[in-house]
Image: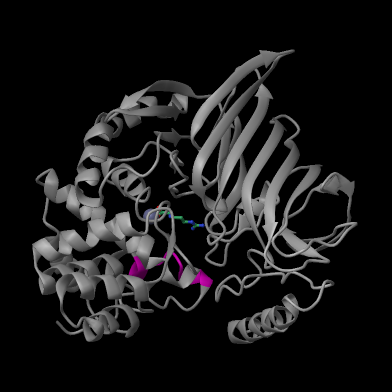
């Protein structure tokens, strides 16, 4: 179905439910949050505060057994609400300790609590589930979610992989804290977000208990497991946990040696590091083909070069802490992370952001870099395309040249601090840039973010 029609339908459906939300006690939470690219991702009618996931994985059979305890607050009266989950057999499903009726429809797990929920009420959902997880294939052909590897699993969620391993309100707008515990055969290591709060081995199985108490979008959760060489310590004064697949140790050494300086340098640009742990997961998952900024533990499918490491660490500020509201604004993550690479290159004496800009600007009109424009990728298949990364970063260089260095770096820092742990839009970035520079930047941003084809300078 053309995207326009899906969107219209989703907007209509949520508008109808919203109109009744306060008046009726039998209201249904909408099946999606109306994202223009992923209309069914996330669910209306409630906010999650905390996920407690208990997972056990057996790499030999590839079976994942999960129990998810989700604490949420109803934002309308709810006779029924949805979570997002792909696949699995549901063993039991309870709301506030009482068995609840449920149905499945694609990624929608539709839950009818025994007693309808009143608006404003906190409630607890417990789902036990089991099965062999399947990776999700995106419109651009890339894979994500729970991706089995030869010694475990590489687990990455952007943009729609989380429902392949836990039931969630899978939308970046509903951040929550997480407790994720993973039980694996002894000898393997399971790595998740935040702090390792427990590790114990019994009967040949080791349980790793992780806690991320900072707000986290569901697509940034990970539970990557396998054989890892673990280094715990401090990086730039922050507790760190770095897990490297034995085959990638030698190749990672040069980049990891720069880790402290990357954190220090990016802190000088964007302000203090937003979370209380840093780390990295460097696996051997060649079929994935990309790295992802999982919160506090960016995932790498192989040994990263220092540029890729700097890119994913910069996302901790721009992407993980300051997060888009809807997916078409993805340049707010990837354009900024690419610009962070250019700043790092400048800092280490390789090339200036202006030189990077000049190189890309020399590419002909026919180059895929120019269309679709970064602020309107238009289709989920273009979410991680060249315009979002490179023309997005070029937009920041044009901003810098327009407002001058002093205002530009004030803008970057204020962006990362004012909206820390929140959700943002491109309009908010433009407004902040105008406030900080006292200039009218509307035409410039429009040309660089929204007009197809190579912009004139
Ligand atoms: N955000 C990742 C990066 O650091 C890219 C993720 C790509 N995901 C995907 N499903 N293709 O650039
Ligand atoms: Zn990125």
Would residue 382 be counted in the magenta stretch?
yes
Residue drawn at the location 42% of the way across and 70% of the way down: 329
Q: Is residue 135 above or below residue 425?
A: above
Residue drawn at the location 68% of the way across and 56% of the way down: 73
Q: Position of residue 386 (x, y in %)?
A: 35, 67
Would residue 283 be counted in the magenta stretch?
no
Quarter of the figure that contains the C terminus: bottom left
Q: Position of residue 331 (x, y in %)?
A: 37, 67
423 left or right of 37 in image? left
Question: Taking the image as drawn, is residue 362 in sight?
Answer: no
**Figure quadrant, ligand 1:** bottom left
Q: How is the image coloured?
A: one colour
Residue drawn at the location 46% of the way across and 41% of the way down: 299
Which residue range is magenta in the image? 380-388
Question: Taking the image as drawn, is residue 6 in sight?
Answer: yes
**329 and 27: which one is in front?**
27
Quarter of the figure that contains the N terminus: bottom right
Q: Is residue 127 above or below residue 359?
A: above
Q: Position of residue 210 (x, y in %)?
A: 56, 31
392 left or right of 109 in image? left
**171 and 252: which one is in front?**
171
């Amino acid at each position: 179905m053309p995207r326009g029609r899906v969107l219209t339908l989703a907007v209509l459906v949520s508008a109808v439910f919203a109109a009744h939300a306060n008046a009726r006690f039998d209201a249904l939470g909408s099946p999606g949050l109306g994202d223009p690219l992923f209309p069914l991702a996330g669910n209306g009618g409630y906010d999650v505060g905390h996920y407690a996931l208990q997972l056990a994985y057996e790499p030999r059979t590839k079976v994942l057994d999960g129990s998810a305890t989700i604490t949420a607050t109803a934002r309308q009266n709810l006779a029924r609400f949805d979570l997002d989950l792909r696949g699995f057999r549901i063993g039991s499903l309870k709301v506030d300790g009482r068995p609840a009726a449920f149905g499945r429809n694609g990624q929608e797990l539709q839950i009818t609590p025994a007693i309808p929920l009143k608006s404003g009420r906190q409630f607890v959902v417990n789902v036990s589930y089991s099965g062999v997880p399947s990776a999700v294939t995106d419109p651009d052909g890339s894979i994500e979610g729970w991706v089995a590897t030869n010694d475990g699993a590489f687990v990455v969620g952007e943009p729609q992989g989380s429902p392949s391993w836990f039931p969630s309100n899978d939308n970046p707008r509903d951040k929550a804290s997480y407790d994720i515990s993973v039980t694996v055969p002894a000898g393997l290591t399971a790595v998740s977000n935040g702090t390792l709060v427990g590790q114990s081995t019994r009967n040949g199985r080791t349980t790793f208990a992780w806690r991320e108490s900072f707000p986290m979008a569901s697509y940034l959760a990970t539970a990557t497991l396998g054989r890892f060489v673990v280094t715990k310590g401090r990086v730039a004064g922050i507790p760190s946990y770095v897990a490297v697949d034995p085959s990638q140790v030698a190749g990672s050494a040069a980049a990891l040696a720069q880790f402290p300086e990357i954190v220090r340098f990016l802190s000088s640009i964007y302000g203090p590091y937003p979370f209380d742990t840093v780390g990295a997961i460097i696996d051997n998952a060649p079929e994935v083909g990309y790295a992802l900024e999982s919160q506090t533990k960016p995932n790498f499918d192989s040994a990263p070069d220092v540029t890729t490491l700097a890119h994913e660490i910069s996302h901790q500020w721009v992407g993980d802490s300051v997060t888009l509201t809807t997916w078409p604004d993805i340049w707010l993550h990837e354009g900024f992370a690419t610009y962070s690479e250019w700043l790092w290159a400048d800092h280490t004496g390789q090339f200036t952001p202006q030189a990077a800009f000049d190189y890309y600007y020399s590419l002909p009109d026919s180059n895929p870099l120019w269309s679709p424009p970064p602020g309107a990728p238009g289709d989920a298949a273009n979410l991680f395309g060249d315009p979002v990364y490179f023309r997005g970063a070029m937009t920041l260089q044009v901003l810098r040249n327009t407002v001058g260095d002093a205002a530009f770096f004030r803008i970057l820092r204020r962006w990362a601090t004012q909206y820390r742990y929140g959700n943002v839009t491109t309009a908010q970035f433009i407004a902040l840039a105008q406030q900080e520079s006292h200039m009218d930047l509307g035409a410039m941003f429009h040309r660089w973010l929204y007009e197809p084809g190579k912009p004139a300078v």
